[in-house]
Amino acid sequence: MDLDRFQAELTTLLAGIEHPKVLAALALSEEAGEVARCVLDAEGYGKDVRADLEGELGDTLVALVEVASRYGISASAAAARVLDKLRRKAPAWREELGGRLEAMRRRLDG
């Protein structure tokens, strides 16, 4: 789904029930914590959390886009901006960290 369309539809759906700015940011933090709980359940306790994780990622996306909307920021523009930044920085990160992260993925991800 297109981020602009998602943000517009979310804004319509939440019209009249938007969080105040500070609560939108706190809701984002809470939803990110739910994602972390799913990862803990999967990696620490061996649970199959894929369905729950998908739902929590969706909730986190809603909370993130609501924060953007409450501050008048286009989620699509923010995504484009970060991709531009990553295009510049990723090659140096890959050179510096690639080998170590590959070893960590083998060790931690199996």
Image (spheres, rainbow, N blue to C red):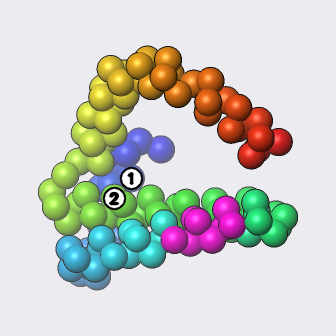
In magenta, the rendered stretch is 33-40
Q: Residues within 10 Å of mark 1 (few under 14, many from 20)?
A: some
State the residue position of label 1: 6
Q: Nearer the viewer, residue 16 or 73?
A: 73
Which element is circle 1 on?
helix
Q: Residues within 10 Å of mark 2 (few under 14, many from 20)?
A: many
Check disc 1 and give the amino acid type.
Answer: Phe
Can residue 86 be seen here? The reply is yes
Question: x, y (%) of residue 31?
Answer: 48, 71
Q: With respect to residue 76, does 42 lie above or below?
A: below
Q: Is residue 74 left or right of residue 52?
A: left
Q: Nearer the viewer, residue 2 or 32?
A: 32
Residue in the image at 77% along x and 41% along y: 107
Res. 23 image quadrant:
bottom left
| Residue 107 falls within the magenta-colored stretch | no
Q: With respect to residue 66, does 75 lie above or below?
A: above
State the residue position of label 2: 65
Can residue 80 be seen here? The reply is no
C-alpha distance separating marks 1 and 2: 9 Å
Which element is circle 2 on?
helix
Res. 85 image quadrant:
top left
Q: Are marks 1 and 2 in contact (CB under 8 Å)?
A: yes
Q: Nearer the viewer, residue 87 or 43?
A: 43
